[in-house]
Image: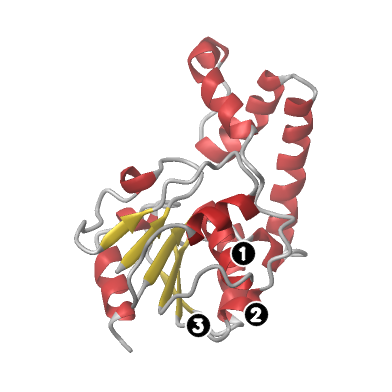
Amino acid sequence: MRLYVHGAGRTGADAWPGAALQDAVFADLEMTTEAAEQATALSRIPVVAPVSVIAHSFGAVPVLIALRDGYVSVDHLVLVEPALYDIARGNPAIERHIAIMSKAREHAHDGDLAAYWRIVRPLIFGGPFEPEKWNSEQALARRFSHITPPWGHDIDPEVITPLHTLVLTGGWNAEYEAIASALSDHSATHVRLEGNKHRVQDHPDFERVVAEFTTAR
């Protein structure tokens, strides 16, 4: 069985349009709750062993918390561009991102959502802030401003050391490559599938690579 854990964007099966539905369970987490609450929610999802957990971006955070705290157990762990910023602190790209996003979150906390979006729109979603689109994008900006940041969760990469772990990145972003490097130092296998940027799960070779990994042992 596979348990798919989405990132901060699409949820449930919508986040994994290429996934086979047979023997698959799709998490549907509320990303504005604390990561620890999301980890507890994962523990309530019924699965049948053996289990492969496949987590994208922020979804890796509650997964590793759940593993760390003994809420779940896995036979194979696949992390797709995991946003595990805690494990790569000190890396220049990681620190730059955290500093920029922390400043943006200060604007949101002070009630200036437009100032928040001027920073976050180009950094996360691509393209500049466009005042004429503000009305249509305001709801997205508000929701995103309430999502728990993917750092400050006391996550140690040692949690994956005894696990059979695959890390997939798109080779486009220094932050995710730094995180993948840290995971590789703790027994993970790192594979790059380039061409789809952050949504590596949309790459035509994604299913083949995951299937080969999860059936290897």
Of 95 and 163, the residue lying toward us: 163
Question: Can residue 46 be seen at all in this image of the molecule?
Answer: yes
Residue 212 appears left or right of 198? left
Q: Residue at x 56, y 51 (%)?
A: 38
> How far from the left and from the top, in percent, is residue 177?
56, 65
Vertical comparison of 22 with 124: above or below: below
Q: Residue at x 73, y 33 (%)?
A: 104
| Cα–Cα gap, marks 1 and 2 | 12 Å
CB contact under 8 Å: marks 1 and 2: no
| Cα–Cα gap, marks 3 and 2 | 10 Å
Mark 1 residue type: Ile
Please report whichever mark, 3 or 1, sits nearer to the chain's N-terminal start. 1
Q: Residue at x 70, y 62 (%)?
A: 86
Residue 203 appears left or right of 183? left
Mark 3 residue type: Leu
Mark 2 residue type: Glu
Vertical comparison of 167 with 14: above or below: below
Give residue 65's mark: 1
Q: Which residue is mark 3?
A: 163
Q: Nearer the viewer, mark 3 or mark 1?
A: 1
The image quadrant of residue 67 is bottom right
> How far from the left and from the top, in percent, is residue 148?
65, 44
Q: Which residue is mark 2?
A: 158
